[in-house]
Amino acid sequence: MAEQPYEFALVMAGAVTAGAYTAGVLDFLFEALDAWEKEKKAGNPNVPTHDVKLSVVTGASAGSMCAAFIGTLADRSFEHVKSPKTYKAGTNPMYEAWVEMIDLNQLLKTDDLKDKDKKVKSLLNATALDTIRDVVFARNPDPSLNIQRDWISDNLPIYLTLTNLRGVPYGLAMDKTNIHGMTLHADRFHTVVKADQAHPAADLVLDSSSHPAQWMTFANAAIASGAFPVGLSPRLVTLPRDNYKTRPWSDALGSVPLEPLWPNTAGGNYRFVTVDGGVINNEPLDIARAALDGFGKSTPKLADRSVILIDPFPDVPSTQKEYDKYDAQLDNTDLTKPDNFDEAMSLLGTAGAIINAMKDQGRFKAQDLIMAARENVHNRYLIGPKPGIASGAISGFGGAISKEFREYDFMLGRKNCQQFLREEFALTLKNEIIEDGYKNITSPGVIDEMKYESAGKNYRPIIPLVTPELREPIEVGDIPKLSKERAKELRGLLSERLETVVPRLFGELLGGVAVVEDILLTFGHDIILNRLMSAMFKQLSNSKQWDGKLTYSEEFPNPPPSPFPVGSGKSSTGFSGVPTVPLTVKDHPKPLHVPGHGP
């Protein structure tokens, strides 16, 4: 066997309900690597002998939940999903979570709002994620499920991104007496699995003997990383404060620790409220690169490691049409005429642009761009949906609309991973690791099954598909469509959720000002319902996932009556739980407190 393994890192981007796609990719990747390892251990002369090692895993949002599955399943066997029709319930934790359990029927329930004394934390019922955590992240103690996966490195680091709303204070010393304060919000949760030694810089260290509560702490961190802002409730995370002191930071000068400027130097835990890690770092390539100790050797001949990004929603550069449209807006704006302000310069338009600019800038990674600009570099790969996924509507929540959407995306992930391993994740025989791994295979038939040609060059897969079953075409079928019956059901579920959420929110905002509340409730419920349903119909129509009429208003010309007729008085104690009071200026609200869902 080749002495030097080929190392790779997996980076799993935020995906919301399209985590089903990422889970499908992982399902096939586990299957392919397990089969190859089995054949090598059996001494099969017709399989490559080089080794690969999964050395780093990073994730954001839904990608963090998938990253947590890698850690949880690193030493556990499970059944692979060849078809949704033949799936046996409970045999694949990733499929169970992302296909069977994530559904709007659960996310739109109102049992999380029974306690009227507690404030609304999210538009959707986030306790559905707690149920998933408790069911599928629990470690099955059955010893028959134990498996040794040599392709997963011992002491595997897994990084889950977090958007820390409290922030970590740092100080930039300007001179002997002055310090310029800075605050870090792009946080992370660092876990090591398959551990056989101490890891002082890690937030959590796990091995096969770790207590189930420790594994549940790992799962909680993954759920916290997926707390989609507004849609899902924030989470509370607790980390040892000293861990920030030893956390390594990497730049062109190397890796160095930076100690925060805490208000006092005492030890103890640091608690903070967090939302979706993808808000600031949705594709944590930088963390993976640093943990992988750079990209190593990157030429085709010497390449020995790489980073693989799994992204159901890969960003694409702006098109010329989009640039021309923006320029045309500015050209048609005459600032001397108050009535001629266009959308790009309106108050709401500017506010939205600022949010997008802050998000995009937080995700901008100059060092990765510099590396990508170099010629002859073979150390970055992307697995993205070909063709498009079914879960893209409603900002990625489209998968929760229909189980058929999630089934499609999971199988598409498996299919795309198969294509990626056969035709993209490959190097020529000039590469030292590949040459050594394939040197003993002489059968022309075996070589023909594995190789592929591109631009006149013969390539060999870094991870070969060593069985005929792995090479069989994966059937996905046509992209599924939403039925009118399901659309009608969703409208009812959404309306019921809004009936509970909207008055509670207005009660918190207005303190029970009855007349104003009545008006806002009446129109707020209808506006939100119509906007959400219209957006869903439009996006599904654009992706050819809706066979009905073009717009929501055409398909449903008689929307359900508002549950809040003006003057009904439902906005006072009946819904908001706040008695009618005069409109006054209220004191500054108390600091945010979120009941503990974290470790």
Image (cartoon, rainbow, N blue to C red):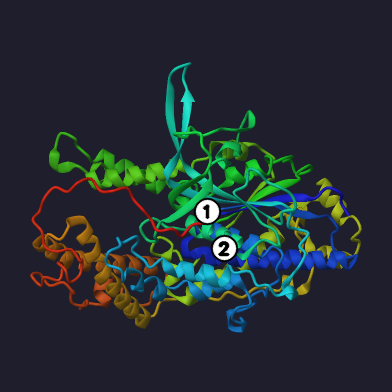
Q: Is residue 272 above or below residue 149?
A: above
Q: Nearer the viewer, mark 2 or mark 1?
A: 2
On screen, residue 337 versus residue 172, left or right, reads left
In the rendered image, the residue lying farthest to the top is 176
| Residue in the picture at 39% in, 48% down | 321
Where does the image place residue 461, in percent across and percent down from the top left?
76, 57
Q: Is residue 487 above or below residue 343?
A: below
Where does the image place residue 75, in percent across and percent down from the top left?
72, 65
Residue corresponding to mark 1:
60
Where does the image place residue 455, in percent across and percent down from the top left?
71, 51
Any mark on residue 216, and which?
A: 2
Q: CA distance from mark 2 to mark 1?
A: 18 Å
Foreground residue, 91 or 86? 91
In the rendered image, the residue lying farthest to the front is 266
On screen, residue 274 versus residue 311, left or right, reads left
| Residue in the picture at 77% in, 68% down | 35
What amino acid is labelled 1 in the image?
Ala
What amino acid is labelled 2 in the image?
Met
Precedes in sequence: disc 2 or disc 1: 1
Tally the marks: 2
